[in-house]
Image (cartoon, coloured by chain):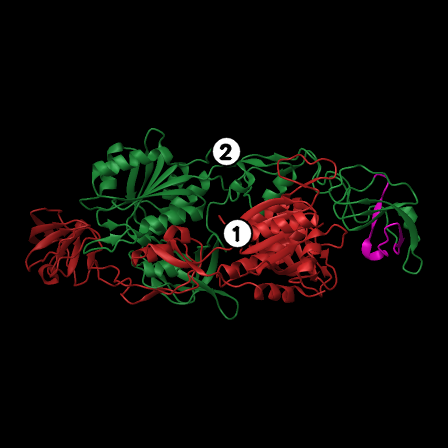
Chain colours: A green, B red
């Protein structure tokens, strides 16, 4: 039996960030940047007005006030989008819109609210020191600035910055393609009413959704019967579209444990026990001509999910180029006590909440059997109970992995 | 000028959760359940083995120990997926796999690890009280149980539970279809090198990505010139696919503020100033025959983003049926001081981090001008500085809205 940390390290050592691909900006959302992005241009590209108002020379309005407005002839009108360079001479003004290019010679903008809004001549009732309400070229980004570094996760504001510096496409780590394979002759597809002895393949749905949640592009193959030839053929067929394979079922000590039987023969997949509850039987290795990484998760739904969280999710995130591989964790006060097996890391399904005094509290989300989906579906956290601890008492401070969702 | 809370309330009152639609499980990921789900069946559907081992009557192995194993004839072999009901008589055993149906008459399972693994007769070296390693029918879910309530966000484990209780499809609130329209004759599409006076439409990319992040299905229309007829025609054309419209630009006090000019004429859109920095000029109302909600955001990128966060994102989440509409917030210690305008709620772009002592700390993410994308792209939080506060001092505890991403 090996420890959770050792097995995790084995899994992480066995996967690498995927090669960069070039994607359109909106396709690159939630991907990790695989290049340092240097701006080829100043942003803004030209001095422009931060307000709707009147472009002026500072000296011309130095004496202006609401009591003694200054009158200037309006010699032009510059809308945003004006592409003609204009020049403002002393003693004149031009009407200018937010974002419009400042005419050369102009030094500042008097907001329209501090004017009578005139179109031929205008009364300006405030001074405007040089630079006032002007966005200077390059004041956001200078040509040559590195605006984003490799490793940055691309969200809305990073994509906007990429667009602003002239990019329509960007190099990111590809999202891992994950093939999800459920094995078990007892399994039927969702929507099929299970007969006596049959069970719905809820794991396939769960692991596919979890892979999406982790940032992968999953392919759910569906149910494969417990038959060595069928399993090997299906697995072989799927490798062409897999950066990673995740199987569930067929890995315990039974007589029909097809996954183990087939993959053991290859000699490239480790099988063994990991000191955790749930999820003890684990397997990890490579298959096929490209040495595609494969995780063989147990078939019990709770064991399968917790194994995914502990090992597969961090591996997917490493492949996708993320710097942070793990869930955020929080400390919380246990509202009840429970026991934990000696010598195993327990990952208890739990509901995390906030007490009246604002402190974080946690309680179990129902029965902890490894087949109990009801409690798993209510869980918002996994409480991490260390190997040496055999009992959590009410009032103990415990560490919780927070099972945040995508759309928060 | 109205307060942020009042404007938010106006916006939230103006949108409603979308009608339920019926989706396949994996399409419903990250959607909000629009029905109470009652299980029509027990889960598990039949008593089954939690281990690979031997099904027994408790009395037959009551005296078994490693020193004095009990020998029993193996009269059958039950794989997982076996659909034939079998019966175990006293004085006999059957080999049984994890998940396989327990034969009637059997009361417990002795794990294979506590046997000699025999196939004709077997030596069992431990007692097994009635119920040991047996998952009783209905022990996870009973027929008639309400397993999930309307309002639940569907993630991997909830989808698995739905599958397990026989569902292949589920009623959820539709994800809002959001049309994103950028207005401004100065705008060019991403990838087009802006000429003198031109600016890349980074807002369109940003708001589209932010809408995805909020759980919507956005359509980015692209750039619309500052011309009333064109804007109105484009808007009208788009309404057929919009549950919500978001425009950016064209709403300040300038002479070319097309959005305001066109929509004011309809009489169904409110325009005004909201007491916040950035993002003061706001508009919200309805357009078209179906009274489609519309937000008119300012054109400055930072104002636009912050307005989206404060008003559009909560509205999208209400439309999608979410119970929690707002970002999670954290308190953090300001590492520097800065000023805030009197009478306005300031939303300062900031980087949230953890100090060496484990406490949460925050600093500004660069220049705070409303055109500065560089600082916005580095921000991981918005610091909320109340209207009455005109100065944040280093060491102050401040509230931060955490800009969590989808793929964490």
In the rendered image, which quarter contains the N terminus of chain A?
top left
Asked if the residue at tag 2 contacts the one at tag 1, i.e. Cβ–Cβ closer than 8 Å, the answer is no
- The question of residue A116 being in magenta is answered with yes
Q: State the residue in front, A375 or B212.
A: B212
- Asked if labels 1 and 2 share a chain, the reply is no
Q: Is residue B368 above or below residue A245?
A: below
Q: State the residue in front, A282 or A386.
A: A282
Give residue B241's mark: 1
Q: x, y percentage for residue A361?
A: 46, 65
Magenta segment: A104-126
Q: CA distance from mark 1 to mark 2?
A: 32 Å
- The question of residue A256 being in magenta is answered with no
Residue marked by disc 2: A21
Tell me which corner region of the image, top left, top right, bottom left or bottom right, holds residue A100: top right
Chain letter for mark 1, please.
B
Residue B301 seen in the current view: no
Q: x, y percentage for residue A199?
A: 24, 53
Please rate how many residues cluster around mark 2, counting C-alpha atoms within 10 Å: few if below 14, some from 14 to 19, many from 20.
some
Please rate how many residues cluster around mark 1, counting C-alpha atoms within 10 Å: few if below 14, some from 14 to 19, many from 20.
some
């Amino acid at each position: 039996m090996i420890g959770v940390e050792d097995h995790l390290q084995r899994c992480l050592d066995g996967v690498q960030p995927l090669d960069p691909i070039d994607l359109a900006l909106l396709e690159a959302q939630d991907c990790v940047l695989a290049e340092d992005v240097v701006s080829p241009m100043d942003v803004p590209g030209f001095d422009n007005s931060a307000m709707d108002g009147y472009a002026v020379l500072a000296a011309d309005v130095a004496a202006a006030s609401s009591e003694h407005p200054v009158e200037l002839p309006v010699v032009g009108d510059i809308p945003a989008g004006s592409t003609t360079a204009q020049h403002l001479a002393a003693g004149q003004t031009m009407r200018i819109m937010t974002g419009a290019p400042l005419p050369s010679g102009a030094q500042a903008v008097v907001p329209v609210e501090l004017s009578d809004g005139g179109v031929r001549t205008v009364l300006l009732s405030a001074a405007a020191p040089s630079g006032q309400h002007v966005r200077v070229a390059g004041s956001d980004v200078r040509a040559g600035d590195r605006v984003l570094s490799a490793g940055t996760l691309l969200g809305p504001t990073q994509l906007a910055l990429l667009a602003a510096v002239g990019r329509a496409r960007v190099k990111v780590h590809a999202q891992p393609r994950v093939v999800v394979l459920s094995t078990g002759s007892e399994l039927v597809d969702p929507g099929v009413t299970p007969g006596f002895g049959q069970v719905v393949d809820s794991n396939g749905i769960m692991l596919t959704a979890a892979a999406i949640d982790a940032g992968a592009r999953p392919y759910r193959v569906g149910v494969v019967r417990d038959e060595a030839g069928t399993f090997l053929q299906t697995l072989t067929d799927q490798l062409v579209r897999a950066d990673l394979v995740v199987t569930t079922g067929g890995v315990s000590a039974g007589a029909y444990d097809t996954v183990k039987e087939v993959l053991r023969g290859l000699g490239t997949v480790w099988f063994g026990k990991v000191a955790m509850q749930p999820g003890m039987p684990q397997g990890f290795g490579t298959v096929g001509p490209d040495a595609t990484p494969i995780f063989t998760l147990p078939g019990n739904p709770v064991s399968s999910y917790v194994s995914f969280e502990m090992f597969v999710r961090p591996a997917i995130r490493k492949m996708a180029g993320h710097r942070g591989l793990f869930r955020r964790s929080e400390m919380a006060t246990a509202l009840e006590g429970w026991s934990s097996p000696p010598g195993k890391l327990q990952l208890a399904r739990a509901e995390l909440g906030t007490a009246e005094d604002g402190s974080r509290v946690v309680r179990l989300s129902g029965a902890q059997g490894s087949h109990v989906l009801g409690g798993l579906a209510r869980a918002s956290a996994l409480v991490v109970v260390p190997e040496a601890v055999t009992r959590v008492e009410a009032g103990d401070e415990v560490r919780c992995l927070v099972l945040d969702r995508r759309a928060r």
